[in-house]
Image (cartoon, helix red, strand yellow):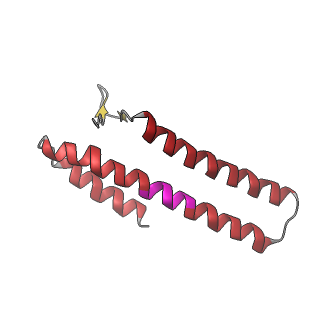
Amino acid sequence: MTCCCKGNEDGNVKHKQRDEQEKKALMTRLSRIEGQVRGIRAMVEDDRYCVDILTQVSAIQAALNGFNKELLARHIKTCVSEDIREGNEEAVDELCELLKKLMK
Protein backbone atom coordinates (compact mmCIF):
# COMPACT_ATOMS: atom_id res chain seq x y z
CA MET A 1 0.00 0.00 0.00
CA THR A 2 1.30 3.42 -0.83
CA CYS A 3 0.93 6.16 1.67
CA CYS A 4 0.42 9.66 0.52
CA CYS A 5 0.52 11.86 3.61
CA LYS A 6 1.48 15.02 1.84
CA GLY A 7 0.74 18.64 2.61
CA ASN A 8 -0.48 21.26 0.18
CA GLU A 9 1.49 24.29 -0.96
CA ASP A 10 1.15 26.17 2.33
CA GLY A 11 1.73 23.01 4.38
CA ASN A 12 -1.41 23.38 6.51
CA VAL A 13 -3.49 20.46 5.24
CA LYS A 14 -2.27 16.91 4.75
CA HIS A 15 -4.07 14.18 2.86
CA LYS A 16 -3.67 10.41 2.81
CA GLN A 17 -4.68 8.23 -0.08
CA ARG A 18 -6.54 5.24 1.42
CA ASP A 19 -7.50 2.10 -0.41
CA GLU A 20 -11.19 1.28 -0.63
CA GLN A 21 -11.01 -1.51 1.96
CA GLU A 22 -9.43 0.74 4.58
CA LYS A 23 -11.82 3.59 3.85
CA LYS A 24 -14.83 1.26 4.02
CA ALA A 25 -13.72 -0.21 7.36
CA LEU A 26 -13.21 3.24 8.88
CA MET A 27 -16.50 4.56 7.51
CA THR A 28 -18.36 1.50 8.84
CA ARG A 29 -16.98 2.13 12.32
CA LEU A 30 -17.92 5.82 12.12
CA SER A 31 -21.44 5.01 10.92
CA ARG A 32 -21.90 2.67 13.86
CA ILE A 33 -20.68 5.36 16.28
CA GLU A 34 -22.96 7.92 14.64
CA GLY A 35 -25.89 5.57 15.16
CA GLN A 36 -24.97 5.18 18.83
CA VAL A 37 -24.88 8.97 19.28
CA ARG A 38 -28.32 9.28 17.66
CA GLY A 39 -29.52 6.57 20.04
CA ILE A 40 -28.34 8.58 23.04
CA ARG A 41 -30.07 11.66 21.67
CA ALA A 42 -33.29 9.66 21.46
CA MET A 43 -32.77 8.42 25.02
CA VAL A 44 -32.41 11.99 26.28
CA GLU A 45 -35.49 13.10 24.34
CA ASP A 46 -37.35 10.13 25.84
CA ASP A 47 -36.26 11.10 29.39
CA ARG A 48 -34.51 7.78 29.90
CA TYR A 49 -32.76 6.94 33.16
CA CYS A 50 -29.34 8.59 33.61
CA VAL A 51 -27.50 5.33 34.25
CA ASP A 52 -28.77 3.87 30.99
CA ILE A 53 -27.61 6.95 29.07
CA LEU A 54 -24.23 6.97 30.79
CA THR A 55 -23.79 3.29 29.93
CA GLN A 56 -24.38 4.10 26.27
CA VAL A 57 -21.97 7.05 26.44
CA SER A 58 -19.34 4.66 27.80
CA ALA A 59 -19.97 2.33 24.87
CA ILE A 60 -19.43 5.22 22.44
CA GLN A 61 -16.19 6.17 24.16
CA ALA A 62 -15.00 2.58 23.79
CA ALA A 63 -16.00 2.59 20.12
CA LEU A 64 -14.12 5.85 19.53
CA ASN A 65 -11.07 4.40 21.29
CA GLY A 66 -11.26 1.39 18.99
CA PHE A 67 -11.47 3.69 15.97
CA ASN A 68 -8.44 5.65 17.21
CA LYS A 69 -6.42 2.46 17.76
CA GLU A 70 -7.18 1.21 14.27
CA LEU A 71 -6.42 4.54 12.60
CA LEU A 72 -3.25 5.03 14.65
CA ALA A 73 -1.98 1.55 13.78
CA ARG A 74 -2.59 2.17 10.08
CA HIS A 75 -0.91 5.59 10.36
CA ILE A 76 2.21 4.10 11.95
CA LYS A 77 2.39 1.21 9.48
CA THR A 78 2.01 3.44 6.44
CA CYS A 79 2.67 7.16 6.84
CA VAL A 80 5.18 7.11 9.69
CA SER A 81 7.17 4.13 8.43
CA GLU A 82 7.29 5.57 4.90
CA ASP A 83 8.41 8.97 6.20
CA ILE A 84 11.19 7.32 8.21
CA ARG A 85 12.34 5.32 5.16
CA GLU A 86 12.44 8.60 3.21
CA GLY A 87 14.58 10.20 5.94
CA ASN A 88 11.86 12.39 7.44
CA GLU A 89 12.66 12.02 11.13
CA GLU A 90 10.10 14.75 11.95
CA ALA A 91 7.45 12.05 11.54
CA VAL A 92 8.59 10.51 14.83
CA ASP A 93 8.26 13.84 16.63
CA GLU A 94 4.81 14.30 15.12
CA LEU A 95 3.83 10.81 16.29
CA CYS A 96 5.09 11.51 19.82
CA GLU A 97 3.05 14.73 19.96
CA LEU A 98 0.00 12.87 18.70
CA LEU A 99 0.39 10.19 21.37
CA LYS A 100 0.59 12.87 24.06
CA LYS A 101 -2.71 14.33 22.83
CA LEU A 102 -4.40 10.94 22.63
CA MET A 103 -3.33 9.98 26.15
CA LYS A 104 -4.83 12.98 27.92
Residue placed furthest toward the top: 9
Q: Give the range drawn in magenta.
A: 63-69
Which quadrant would the C terminus be assigned to in this image? bottom left
Residue placed furthest toward the bottom: 51
Q: Is the magenta stretch mostly helix, strand or loop?
A: helix
Residue 57 placement, left or right of 2: right
Classify residue 57 by image quadrant.
bottom right
Residue 31 placement, left or right of 67: right
Nearest to the observer: residue 22 or residue 60 = 22
Residue 22 belongs to magenta span: no
Total numbered labels placed on residues in the image: 0
Classify residue 36 by image quadrant.
bottom right
* Figure check: 59 above or below 37: below
Nearest to the observer: residue 4 or residue 10 = 4
Residue 65 placement, left or right of 14: right
Residue 69 position in % (x across, y down): 42, 58
Residue at 42% x, 61% y is: 102
* Figure check: 65 above or below 35: below
Residue placed furthest toward the left: 87
Residue 37 position in % (x across, y down): 69, 53
Residue at 39% x, 34% y is: 19
Residue placed furthest toward the right: 46
Residue 3 placement, left or right of 49: left
Residue 65 belongs to magenta span: yes
Residue at 75% x, 58% y is: 40
Residue at 75% x, 55% y is: 39
Residue 65 position in % (x across, y down): 50, 61
Which quadrant would the N terminus be assigned to in this image? top left
Residue 12 position in % (x across, y down): 35, 34
